[in-house]
Image: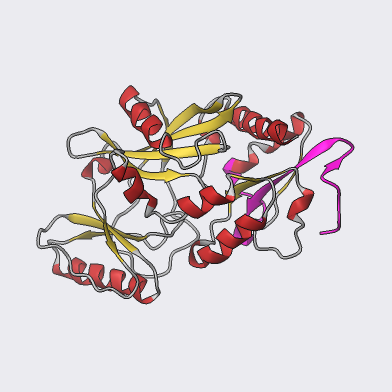
Amino acid sequence: MTDRHKSTRGKPRVALVTCTKLADLDPDDRLVLAPLAARGATVEAPVWDDPDVDWSSYDLVVLRSPWDYALRRDEFVAWAASVPALVNPADVVRWNTDKRYLAELNAAGVPTVPTSWVGPGESWQPPADTGEYVIKPAVSAGSQDTGRYDLADPEHRDLAVAHVRRLSTAGRTTMVQPYLSAVDTEGETALLFLAGPDGLAFSHAIRKGPMLTGPNLGPDGLYKAEEISARTARPDQLAVAERTLATVPGGTRQLLYARVDLIPGPDGDPILVELELTEPSLFIGYADGAPDRLATAITTHLARRA
């Protein structure tokens, strides 16, 4: 990339950060291009690990779809720390890209999916009960390396052990969680929050259908396909989301966006699956006005840095 000033004829320059496999951006992210152009911004989609990008030339660098970082998290976190004007900021990236943050949130009183942790090099044996369990790495994106196992099935038990061993041998921390059966009927609810003048504000919600159909047998694609539809958030879901966001280190005013993923627990109350602050799909194509709200959130952060 040739040297360029941060603005061209007064137009702020915005980077929507992606990865090589999505060099033209995810289709959902492309919906914000026209609203940003209407607000006078010049927008580009640089790849996060492209050594020729001059990140200091941008007025704002927005993490969007760098979804190939999971096996190179240390490199990604170091890159984030080197980028001026990054949102969400580098300290949030460091904290949020390792799902062990869920233990912190649980300790702070946020209802979360019960989780056992298996460290790198550790062995694991399935519990004696015969329920269904989810196994996944603590560092992942797009449900990569994630599987569902019915421990009443001897083959599944063996495959579950093999899955944990595969992750452990690769030096990765493994999460073992009970499978929440309500996802098969109600699905998962993602609540999207976008920056406004007074901090994060609720924008919209979507429903994700069940994604895990069985064991993970090896390498995945960049992300798993999702069944998405619009959803109206309930008051109890919004309450859990607000409680979750209140625990973010450094507060939420620093954030451009947040996604809170919830599933009904055994008693029907919503519990947290993940708090997505690094590179979440924002599903702006599923809610009227959401592309404009995201564009406004970006220009709000531009104004703060002016």
Q: Can I make out residue 248 in this image?
A: yes
Is 57 in front, or is 27? 57
Is 285 in front, or is 38? 38
Q: Quadrant of residue 6?
A: top right
Residue appearing at x 64%, y 51% in the figure: 17
**Is 23 within the magenta?**
yes
Residue 167 to residue 35: above or below? below
Residue 15 to residue 218: above or below? above
Q: Is residue 9 left or right of residue 212?
A: right
Residue appearing at x 14%, y 55% in the figure: 131
User: How many numbered tags mark residues here?
Assistant: 0
Q: Quadrant of the N terminus?
A: bottom right
Residue 305: give x, y in percent of width and height. Answer: 71, 36
Q: Is residue 236 left or right of residue 130?
A: right
Q: Quadrant of the C terminus?
A: top right
Q: How is the image coloured?
A: secondary structure
Is 176 in front, or is 305? 305
Residue 90: give x, y in percent of width and height. Answer: 58, 51
Q: Quadrant of residue 53?
A: bottom right
**Is 33 within the magenta?**
no
Residue 246: give x, y in percent of width and height. Answer: 42, 34
Q: Which residues are magenta?
A: 1-28
